[in-house]
């Protein structure tokens, strides 16, 4: 007979949707077998109960055997040997249906007993195990949901211990029940053959012993056929016993070895270290789905990676669905208000963000490492895990400090192993340094022990402290990041250029020089390598606003300015040569001691590194031209003021000359001889204006004398 279909007992602990789907097929087959066995049992019961209807009952049995080919069994439906055997039995039974008589004792022992045992004991046992397994599965889902809802803020050791114990008990119960249930279903695939063949074999033997006169119908050929069938039944039973023994051994071994996997978290992290070289992973995770503008819900799904895609599959689904594309994506651990072990996957264009929750911290870190490796497209290589291991090792070696320049120079000598390590370092961390760095030590750019800042902290300066003191004295509420609301509004209103980008802060560190073209690439290399060594995947997402006056990092949720970089302090800005998502800029500012310090800031964007650098360069050009225009306008205003002042002085001088001329005219008029006496009848009449002129002339004369 052909091979028997079996359920994999080794996959019961994982409880994947594929295993559940296969289990559904076996359950459907069990229902079909139960239905068919019930009909066969009823047919044989009619033979036993109604001797008068023996012929009709035998005919019905023959008809049912002939209809075996029409039965749609999900498993073993194309068994030609079984089908032909049953057809032969149906033919013989049809021929002997008119010859049967009272066979009460023989039929009860040889025919009814095996089918009754199969129906009442085996099938009912499977139904009972199915109900117990369903209850255990529901209890496990309830326990894991309760464990996942443990609050991080209200951490209670007693409640957490109870939840862990509940998960352990329910998972162990589900695993054990599922293994025994699988064993019974696998055993049924053998028993259904014996349950169908043994009653028929007993029936025929009873017919042979009872009807000695039917020897002309039951020839030697039929006896050989029956003997062959009996041998086949014994072989099937022997195979079933061997398979049952192997399955029992497998169950015992898995019960001993899988005890540590029942707990949701490993009590000893050193016993199971985190594997960071994975390029494929699968397992159950919780995904956060938005149910409204503010509210959200968590749903437990089975997730797995397929190439560069993240897939999810429900327990009752046959195939999985696409969640997001992992190529060039970003992944980081996030803090949730009500969940632990959460991480966030952002697509390469930043349009889709998926928040997931793992079962333990180890599982969370392995998922983050796997998605990070897939994002670098390591899975496309032949030996993906070895390449991932080399990438992580090269990231560790990239920041290993060399004691001297000679040792670094010796490590950079051309060799097969060195070239391979260097190539992996370039592919994982950054581009190869410029030729200038081969002569000049890297210590001239960045000090070996310079601390790296991985989170956004506002720089403390005397100016900001003065602002905070002034704001405190005046009673006004100041910005906690050292920036007032008035300056922000003025900058946003007066600036010509406004460009907003989504960025994620990777880190910053102080550099020794701000003019070197390689300082940004060297800082990128050290920050990325340090993140890989210390397993830092969390990145703070912000909005970078580029204006003609400054660069601002704005919180996307509260719209509060986290950091403000004056554009005049930005010395240079450049992006990564290979990874266009990475960019950085060097900020030079005055320290409290009076000297200047340079700090390099590194960010990750959504494939906008070059665009952001071009925008910053454009802002500096606009600011430069605006400053030149402002100086030209101020110079023009000063020239206009000088011309106005010169005109005023000229007008004053002309007025003085006019006054002097008038005074001289009056003096000359006052120095003339008196008028001759008038003739008779003539009188000299002076008008008021003339009298006033004479008075003014006298006063002018006196003033002139005094001045002389």
Image: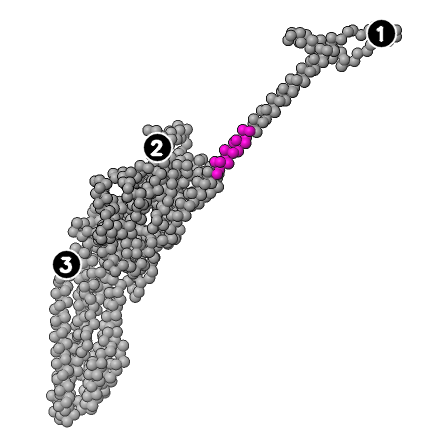
Residue 590 occupies which quadrant of the picture?
Answer: top left
Q: Around disc 2, counting alpha carbons within 10 Å, would you say few (fewer than 14), some (14 to 19), or many (20 or more)?
A: few
Task: Report if the CB atoms under discs 3 and 1 are less than 8 Å apart.
Answer: no
C-alpha distance separating marks 3 and 2: 63 Å
Q: Position of residue 115 (x, y in %)?
A: 17, 78
Residue positioned 88% across, 8% down in the render: 681
Asked whether residue 421 appears in the rendered view, the answer is: no
Task: Report if the CB atoms under discs 3 and 2 are less than 8 Å apart.
Answer: no
- Give residue 257's mark: 3
The answer to whether 358 is drawn above or below residue 694 in the figure is: below
For this view, does 580 lie left or right of residue 171? right
Q: Nearer the viewer, residue 490 or 293?
A: 490
- Give residue 311's mark: none
Q: Is residue 630 magenta?
A: yes
Give the magenta part as a residue range: 625-639
The answer to whether 518 is drawn above or below residue 53 in the figure is: above
Identify the element where label 2 is drawn: strand
Q: Is residue 502 magenta?
A: no
Report the residue marked by disc 2: 596
């Amino acid at each position: 007979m052909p091979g028997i279909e079996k359920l994999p007992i080794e996959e019961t602990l994982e409880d994947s949707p594929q295993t559940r789907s296969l289990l559904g097929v076996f359950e459907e087959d069990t229902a079909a077998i139960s239905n068919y066995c019930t009909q066969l049992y009823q047919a044989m019961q009619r033979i036993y109960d109604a001797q008068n209807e023996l012929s009709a009952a035998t005919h019905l049995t023959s008809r049912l055997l002939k209809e075996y080919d029409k039965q749609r069994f999900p498993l073993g439906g194309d068994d030609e040997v079984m089908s032909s055997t049953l057809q032969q039995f149906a033919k013989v039974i049809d021929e002997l249906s008119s010859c049967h008589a009272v066979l009460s004792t023989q039929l009860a022992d040889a025919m009814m007993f095996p089918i009754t045992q199969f129906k009442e004991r085996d099938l009912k046992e499977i139904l009972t195990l199915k109900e117990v397994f369903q209850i255990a599965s529901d209890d496990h889902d309830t326990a894991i949901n309760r464990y996942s809802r443990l609050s991080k803020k209200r951490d209670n050791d007693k409640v957490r211990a109870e939840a862990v114990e509940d998960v352990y008990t329910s998972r162990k119960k589900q695993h054990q029940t599922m293994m025994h249930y699988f064993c019974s279903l696998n055993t049924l695939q053998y028993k259904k053959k014996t349950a169908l063949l043994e009653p028929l074999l007993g029936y025929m033997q009873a017919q042979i012993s009872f009807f000695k006169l039917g020897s002309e119908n039951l020839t030697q050929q039929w006896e050989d056929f029956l003997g062959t069938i009996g041998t086949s039944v014994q072989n099937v039973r022997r195979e079933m016993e061997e398979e049952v023994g192997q399955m029992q051994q497998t169950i015992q071994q898995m019960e001993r070895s899988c005890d540590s996997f029942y707990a949701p978290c490993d009590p000893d992290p050193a016993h199971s270290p985190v594997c960071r070289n994975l390029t494929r992973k699968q397992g159950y995770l919780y995904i956060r789905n938005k149910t409204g503008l503010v509210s959200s819900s968590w749903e437990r799904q089975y997730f797995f990676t397929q190439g560069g895609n993240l897939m999810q599959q429900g327990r009752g689904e046959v195939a999985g669905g696409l969640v997001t594309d992992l190529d060039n994506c970003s992944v980081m651990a996030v803090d949730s208000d009500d969940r632990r072990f959460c991480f966030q996957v952002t697509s390469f264009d930043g349009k889709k963000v998926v928040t997931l929750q793992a079962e333990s911290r180890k599982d969370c870190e392995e998922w983050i490492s796997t998605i990070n490796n897939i994002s670098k497209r390591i899975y496309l290589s032949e030996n993906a895990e070895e390449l991932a291991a080399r990438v992580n090792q090269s990231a560790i070696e990239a920041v290993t400090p060399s004691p001297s320049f000679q040792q670094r120079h010796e490590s950079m000598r051309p060799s097969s192993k060195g070239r391979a390590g260097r190539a992996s370092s370039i592919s994982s961390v950054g581009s190869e340094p410029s030729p200038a760095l081969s002569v000049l030590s890297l210590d001239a750019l960045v000090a070996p022990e310079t601390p790296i800042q991985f989170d956004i902290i506002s720089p403390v300066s005397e100016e900001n402290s003065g602002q905070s003191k002034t704001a405190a004295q005046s009673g006004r509420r100041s910005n906690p990041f050292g920036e007032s609301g008035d300056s922000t509004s003025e900058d946003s209103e007066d600036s010509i250029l406004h460009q907003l980008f989504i960025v994620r802060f990777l880190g910053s560190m102080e550099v020794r020089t701000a003019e070197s073209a390689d300082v940004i690439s060297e800082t990128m290399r050290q920050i990325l390598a340090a993140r890989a060594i210390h397993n830092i995947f969390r990145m703070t997402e912000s909005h970078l606003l580029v204006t003609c006056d400054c660069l601002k990092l704005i919180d996307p949720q509260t719209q509060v300015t986290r950091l403000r970089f004056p554009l005049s302090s930005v010395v240079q800005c450049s992006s990564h040569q290979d990874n266009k998502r990475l960019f950085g800029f060097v900020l030079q500012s005055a320290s409290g001691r009076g000297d200047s310090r340079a700090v390099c800031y590194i960010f990750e964007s959504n494939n906008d590194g070059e665009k952001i650098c071009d925008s910053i360069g454009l802002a500096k050009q606009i600011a430069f031209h605006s400053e030149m225009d402002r100086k030209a306008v101020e110079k023009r205003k000063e020239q206009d003021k000088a011309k106005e002042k010169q005109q005023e002085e000229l007008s004053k001088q002309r007025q003085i000359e006019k006054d002097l001329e008038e005074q001289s005219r009056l003096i000359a008029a006052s120095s003339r001889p008196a008028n001759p006496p008038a003739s008779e009848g003539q009188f000299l009449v002076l008008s008021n204006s003339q009298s006033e002129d004479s008075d003014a002339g006298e006063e002018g004369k006196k003033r002139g004398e005094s001045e002389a």
